[in-house]
C-alpha cells in the first residue's frame, strides 16, 4: 500500500474575465493527476486556488465602471461554470484569496518577527537578502527580481511585496497591523497551501510562467517562515496560439468557453492529452479538428464486434502514466486498444481522463465512476458512513451501484 495522503497545491486563475483556454491546462492536468493517484491507491487532496485580489481585477473593473469585488465574484462564477463543463469534477478545496486574509496577515507578521520582512509606509516587503536559498527552484538570481516589482519604498530593489498599502484608486482593502491594504499575490499561495494542506505537502503545480518569480517567492516565504513546503514541483508548459489562424475563427484570445462551444468538452480534453504536460502546446483549429477526429474514432470503437489481441496491457498504460504522467504514450495505447477492438480496456483508460466511448448514455459518466471508486475505497477502509454518503450522491445523479466480489462494482442507470 503506497504511503498517503498526497497533498497538492496548484495555482489557479486570476479572475477578471472568462479564462483563456490555456488557463484550463493546470486545472485539467491536476484533476487528471489527482484521479490517477486515487486509482493508484493514494489518498489525494487537491487545493486549486482562485486569485480574486489583483491589480488586473482593479484595472478591468474600473474600465467597466463596476466594483472590483463584483467583477471578481462574477468572473469566479464564470471560471467555475467553464471548468465544470469539462466534466472532470471539482478540486477538493478552491480557496479564494479574499477568504484567506487573516491567515495571510498572520504569516506576514511571522516573517516580520523573524526579520525576513519589513514594513515601509504601509507596504510590507520580503527581504530577499535574508533568504540564501533564493533562486534554487528557478535558477533565477535575486537580481532578476528587480524588474518584476519596482518600488521606491523598498530597502533593496530585489525585495518583493507581501502587503500593499491601499491606493486611492483601489476600491477593496482589508485592515492590517500596517494599515489598510491588500495582500501581494505570492503570499496568498503560501498561506492557502498551509491552511488546507499543512506546512509540508507533496506536489505543487502551476504554469511554467509562474516558476519565477511567483513560485520562487512562495518558497522564500514559506521556507523562510520555517515550513518545509512543497516537495515536488510540476510545471505545465504554455499554450501557444497561431495568431493568424485564430483571428479567423474565434479571435486572438480564445476563452475556454469559446473552445468548449466550438468543439465540445471531449475534443478539448483530447487536445491536451496529445502533449506531455511539460511541453508547450499549440492551439489551432487544425489541432482541435485532429482532436475531434480522435474522439469520433474512440466512439466508433464501441461498434467493433470482434476484439483482437493487443500488445498492450493495463500495466503498459499504467507504466506510461507512472512515468511523469506521459499522456501522449497513454493516448497511443488507447488508440492501439481501439484498433484492436479492446473496448473494455479502452473504456477503462478513457475514464481516467474524463472521457467515455459510450454515446447512448448507458455508460455512467466519469464523475459517477469517480464517486463509485471513492465509495469502494471508503468501504475498504471500513468507513461505512462515507460509503453511504457517496452512495446517496451517486443515487442523486441517477445511478445505482451494485457490488460484486473482490471490490468490483457495476453502475446501472436508475429508471426514473
Ligand atoms: Zn500561486
Image: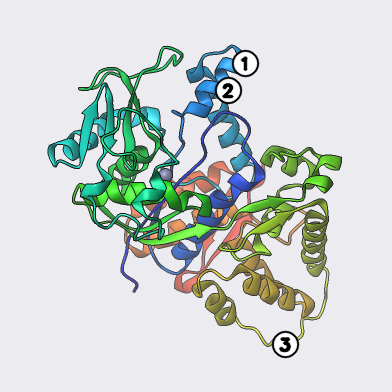
Quarter holding the N terminus is bottom left
* Residue at x-position 68% and y-position 64%: 274
**In this orientation, which residue lies closer to the viewer: 157 or 240?**
157
User: What x and y, as percent, mark residue 41?
Assistant: 41, 68
Marks 2, 3: nearer the viewer: 2
Quadrant containing ligand 1: top left
> Decide: marks 1, 2 in contact (CB < 8 A)?
yes
* Residue at x-position 59% and y-position 58%: 411
Dot 1 corresponds to which residue? 64
Q: How many marks?
A: 3
Mark 2 neighbour class, 10 Å CA radius: few under 14, some 14 to 19, many 20 or more:
some
In-image side of 299 versus 113 (left or right): right
Q: Is residue 318 above or below residue 101?
A: below
User: What x and y, as percent, mark residue 276?
Assistant: 60, 66
Dot placed on the residue nearer the N-terminal end, 1 or 3: 1
> Can residue 116 be seen from the camera position used here?
yes
Q: Which residue is most to the left?
A: 113
> Decide: marks 1, 3 in contact (CB < 8 A)?
no
Q: Is residue 60 above or below residue 251?
A: above
Q: Which element type, helix, strand or loop, lies under badge 1?
A: helix
* Residue at x-position 72% and y-position 77%: 337
In-image side of 40 versus 100 (left or right): right
Q: Which residue is most to the right?
A: 248
Tell me the number on the disc at residue 400.
Answer: none
Marks 1, 3: nearer the viewer: 1
Tell me the number on the disc at residue 309.
Answer: 3
Q: Which element type, helix, strand or loop, lies under badge 3?
A: loop
Quarter holding the C terminus is top right
Instruction: Report how far apart the C-alphas of labels 1 and 3 lie in the structure.
Output: 60 Å
Dot 2 corresponds to which residue? 60
Q: Which element type, helix, strand or loop, lies under badge 2?
A: helix
Q: Is residue 56 above or below residue 386?
A: above
Amino acid at each position: 500500500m503506497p504511503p498517503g495522503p498526497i497533498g497538492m497545491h496548484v495555482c489557479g486563475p486570476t479572475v477578471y474575465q472568462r479564462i483563456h483556454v490555456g488557463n484550463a491546462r493546470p486545472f485539467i492536468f491536476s484533476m487528471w493527476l489527482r484521479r490517477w493517484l486515487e486509482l493508484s491507491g493514494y489518498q489525494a487532496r487537491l487545493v486549486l486556488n482562485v486569485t480574486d485580489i489583483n491589480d488586473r481585477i482593479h484595472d478591468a473593473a474600473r474600465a467597466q465602471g463596476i466594483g472590483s469585488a463584483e467583477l471578481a465574484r462574477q468572473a469566479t462564477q464564470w471560471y467555475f461554470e467553464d471548468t465544470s463543463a469539462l466534466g472532470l469534477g471539482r478540486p477538493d478545496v478552491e480557496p479564494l484569496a479574499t477568504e484567506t486574509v487573516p491567515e495571510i496577515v498572520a504569516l506576514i507578521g511571522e516573517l516580520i518577527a523573524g526579520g525576513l520582512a519589513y514594513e515601509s509606509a504601509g507596504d510590507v516587503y520580503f527581504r530577499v537578502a535574508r533568504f540564501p536559498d533564493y533562486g534554487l527552484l528557478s535558477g533565477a538570481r535575486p537580481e532578476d527580481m528587480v524588474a518584476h516589482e519596482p518600488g521606491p519604498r523598498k530597502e533593496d530593489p530585489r525585495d518583493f511585496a507581501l502587503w500593499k498599502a491601499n491606493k486611492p484608486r483601489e476600491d477593496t482593502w482589508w485592515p492590517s497591523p500596517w494599515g489598510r491594504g491588500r495582500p501581494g499575490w505570492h503570499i496568498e499561495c503560501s498561506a492557502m497551501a498551509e491552511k488546507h494542506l499543512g506546512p509540508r505537502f507533496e506536489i505543487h503545480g502551476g504554469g511554467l510562467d509562474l516558476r519565477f518569480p511567483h513560485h520562487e517567492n512562495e518558497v522564500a516565504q514559506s521556507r523562510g517562515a520555517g515550513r518545509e513546503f512543497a516537495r515536488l514541483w510540476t510545471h505545465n508548459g504554455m499554450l501557444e496560439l497561431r495568431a493568424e489562424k485564430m483571428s479567423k475563427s474565434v479571435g486572438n484570445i480564445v476563452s475556454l468557453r469559446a473552445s468548449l462551444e466550438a468543439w465540445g468538452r471531449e475534443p478539448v480534453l483530447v487536445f491536451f492529452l496529445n502533449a506531455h504536460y511539460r511541453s508547450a502546446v499549440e492551439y489551432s483549429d487544425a489541432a482541435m479538428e485532429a482532436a475531434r477526429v480522435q474522439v469520433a474514432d474512440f466512439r466508433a470503437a464501441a461498434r467493433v464486434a470482434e476484439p483482437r489481441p493487443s500488445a498492450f496491457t493495463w500495466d503498459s498504460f499504467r507504466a506510461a502514466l507512472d512515468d511523469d504522467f506521459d499522456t501522449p504514450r497513454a493516448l497511443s495505447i488507447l488508440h492501439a486498444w481501439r484498433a484492436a477492438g479492446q473496448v473494455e480496456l479502452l473504456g477503462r483508460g478513457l475514464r481516467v481522463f474524463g472521457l467515455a466511448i459510450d454515446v447512448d448514455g448507458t455508460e455512467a459518466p466519469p464523475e459517477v465512476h469517480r464517486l463509485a471508486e471513492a465509495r469502494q475505497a471508503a468501504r475498504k477502509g471500513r468507513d461505512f458512513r462515507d460509503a453511504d454518503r457517496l452512495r446517496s450522491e451517486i443515487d442523486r445523479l441517477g445511478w445505482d451501484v451494485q457490488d460484486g466480489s473482490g471490490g468490483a462494482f457495476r453502475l446501472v442507470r436508475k429508471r426514473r
